[in-house]
Image: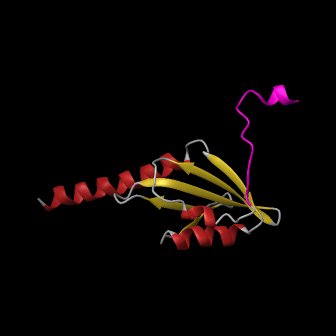
Amino acid sequence: MKKHIFAAATALLLAGCASTETVLSQPVTQTFHSTDSATKVAFCLANKNNTAALDREDGAKVVLIKNGYGGVSMAFSVYPDGTGSRIEYRKKFGTIGGIWRQCIGPDAKRAEVIPMGSASLRS
């Protein structure tokens, strides 16, 4: 019986890791540019959502927002960009509230999204 419980717990832990990678591998929902540093934005996102920012090898600070069941509902990848930061927002599930918007700063600009294949049309 203990083996079955251990196997079930292990499966749940592995499923949680897979959902994180699933969300991070999705296309970016929105990109923002902020005059605040990447460290400041990531700290704010983590602090307001009672979680920690994760450092990645590509230089990003990643903040994962989880729902009540432990699944990742939103992921923020925050990159240094000049004197400010670039925030890539990925949304998997809807959540109530948008306190995260306070963290990107009042002067954050939403980046223009150019659909793939249409870049040649703008040249």
Residue at 54 percent of width and 55 percent of height: 75
Placement of the N terminus among the 4 image quadrants: bottom left
Q: Is residue 65 above or below residue 123?
A: below
Q: Position of residue 83 (x, y in %)?
A: 82, 66
Determine if residue 72 is in view.
yes
Q: Left of 79 or right of it: where is 82?
A: right
Residue sitting nearer the eye, 46 or 8 = 46
Q: Residue furthest right?
A: 123
Q: Left of 94 or right of it: where is 15?
A: left
Query: Which stretch did the figure color magenta?
Result: 108-123
Residue at 73 percent of width and 27 percent of height: 117
Q: Is residue 112 magenta?
A: yes
Q: Position of residue 123 (x, y in %)?
A: 88, 30
Q: How many marks?
A: 0
Determine if residue 62 is in view.
no
Residue sitting nearer the eye, 17 or 69 = 69
Q: Is residue 57 above or below residue 110?
A: below
Q: Main secondary structure of the magenta part?
A: loop
Q: Position of residue 86 (x, y in %)?
A: 72, 57
